[in-house]
Amino acid sequence: MSESEALFNVLRQSADADSVAAIERAVRDAPDRELCRINALDFAAKNGLDEERTLAAFLHAARLGLYELSWNVICPGCGGVLEAGATLKTVNHDEYACTLCAAGYKPTLDEMVEVTFTVSPRVRHIAGHNPDTLPEVEYYRQIFWGSGIDLPDTLGDSLADFTIDSIELPPGEKAVLSVQLPNDFVIAFDPVTHGALFLDVKGEPTHERQTLSMVFNKVKTLAGTVEIRPGPLRLSLENRTDGRVLPALWIAGDSLHRLLGKRRPFVTAKRLLTNQTFRDIYRTDTLDIDQRLKITSLTFLFTDLKGSTALYERVGDLVAYDLVRQHFHVLQEIVAAEAGAVVKTIGDAVMATFSTPDRALAAALRMREAMARINAERQNEDLLLKIGIHEGPCLAVMLNNSQDYFGQTVNVAARVQGLASSRAIFVTQPVVQDPRSADILKTLKLEPAMQRAALRGIADETTVYEIP
C-alpha cells in the first residue's frame, strides 16, 4: 500500500465518505489545474456534495498532509492574489496594495482572505507546484487570480480579447516590445511581480516612435500613469528578479471588466474560523499572539442555563453534571450542523460564532426545541436555556492560547443573552433585519416582540427583539 493510499484510509475514518471519494477521484483523474488552489465550495457544487462536509474533508486532508492549505489575500477589485501564505499568521500587514487596481486595502477576513487547497507533492506532483513552468494563461488561472473569479475554460481567448502583446522574460534578461497603441487606456502589467504601468493613451495619433521602459523587481509599488499618444510604442523591459516574468500590454476596457466581473462563492477566512472542524483540528495554530485581524460582520450566539446552581442542589452533583454535559453535547452538534463553531464554554454558558445571522437564528431555534425535548423526556424543567444573538464587526485575536474574538459586538451579544428569561431568545436589530433571518421567522410564523433595553456597560439603550 502506498503512503497516499494509507492516508486516504485514515481520511475515510474521519470525514464524509462521499466527499473523500470525490477528493480521491480528483487526485487520480483530474487535470493538474483542477488540483491547484481548489475552491472547496465550487468543488462541492460540481460534485453534488454538501458544502460543510466537503470543507471538513479538505481540512482533514490538509491536516494529514494530502493537501496543502493556503491563506490568500485577495484584491476586492480585480480578484488577484496579493499574497499567499501557509497560515493566517502571514496576514500581518496593515494595508495591501494592488498595483493592477492602483488601490490599497486594509485586510479583513470577510472577503479579502480566501482559503484554498492544493494537492501535496507527496501525493501527486502537478505543474502548479512549479509556477515558473506554467504557460502564461495557466499562470493567470492557477496562481494570479483567486478562486472567487469564475474563469472560463477558454481563458486564453478571453485574454486575447484585450491583450495587445505579451512576452515571457527569463531572469536577468531584457527585451523590447514594439506595438501600436490604440486610443484606449492601456495597462502594462506583470502577474509575477505585480509590476504595472498605466498608459493614458489620448490625443492626436502620431507616426513618431514613442519610448518607455519598465524594470521588474520584487518591490511592489502602486503604478504611475503616463500620458501618451496613439501610435507606435517601443517598450523596453528588464527583469531584475531571480525568476521569469510575464509582462503584457492590456486594454483596460469592457473585455477585461467582463472577465473580472464573473464571480463565484469561495471559502473566506471568516468562514473557516467559524467552522467547527477547523477549530477542532487546528486549535492554537491560527493566529500569532499580537495579531488583530478585522472581521466586518460576524454573528455571535451566547447561551446560558438558568438556575444551574439550583439544579445541582435539586438533583445532586452526578445527575446535574451528566445533564449539563448532555446539554453541551447537543448544543455543539447543533452549532456545527448550522455551519458555526463553539468558541468557548464559560461555566454553563456557550459562546459560538456564525458567518451569517440566519444560521445563528436557526441554531438558536433548534437549541430551544432540543432542550424542550430533553425536558419532556425527563418530565421536568431542569434545562432552561437563555439565548442571545448579535451581529457586527469584531477583531479575531489569540487569547489564552486559543483563537477568540474581541470588540463591542461580543460585549453586546453577551449582554443581550443576559436579558433573556428561560426558553427566551433575544436578538438585536441586525439579526431580525437580515433577509434570510426574516424568511425563517416568516416561515415559522414567529413575530419578534421589539423592546428597548439598557445593557450593562453600553451607554445608549439598545433595540432588542424577543423571539416567542
Image (cartoon, rainbow, N blue to C red):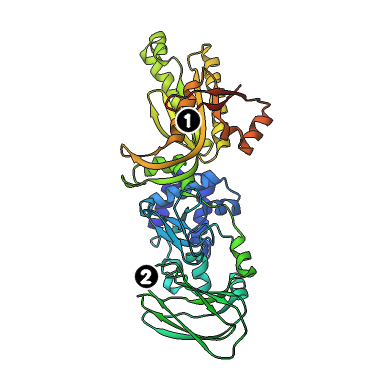
Q: Which residue is mark 2?
A: 218
Image quadrant holding the C terminus, namely top right
Q: Foreground: 302 or 35?
A: 302
Closer to the camera, 417 or 350? 417
Q: Amino acid at mark 2?
A: Lys
Secondary structure state at the residue bearing disc 1: helix
Q: Residue furthest bottom?
A: 208
Please, which residue is most extreme toward the top here?
A: 314
Whether residue 337 appears in this view of the structure is yes
Label 1 close to label 2 by CB (< 8 Å): no
| Amino acid identity at mark 1 | Ala
- 429 in relation to 58, above or below: above
Q: Position of residue 393 (x, y in %)?
A: 48, 41
| Quadrant of res 319 | top left
Question: Along the polypeptide, which appears first: circle 1 or circle 2?
Answer: 2
Q: Which residue is mark 1?
A: 413
Distance between the alpha carbons at the discs numbered 1 and 2: 45 Å
Question: What residue is shown at x 32% (from left), y 47% (from top)?
Answer: 288
Examine the image and state in which quarter residue 194 appears: bottom left
Compare residues 426 and 386 and report the one nearer the observer: 426
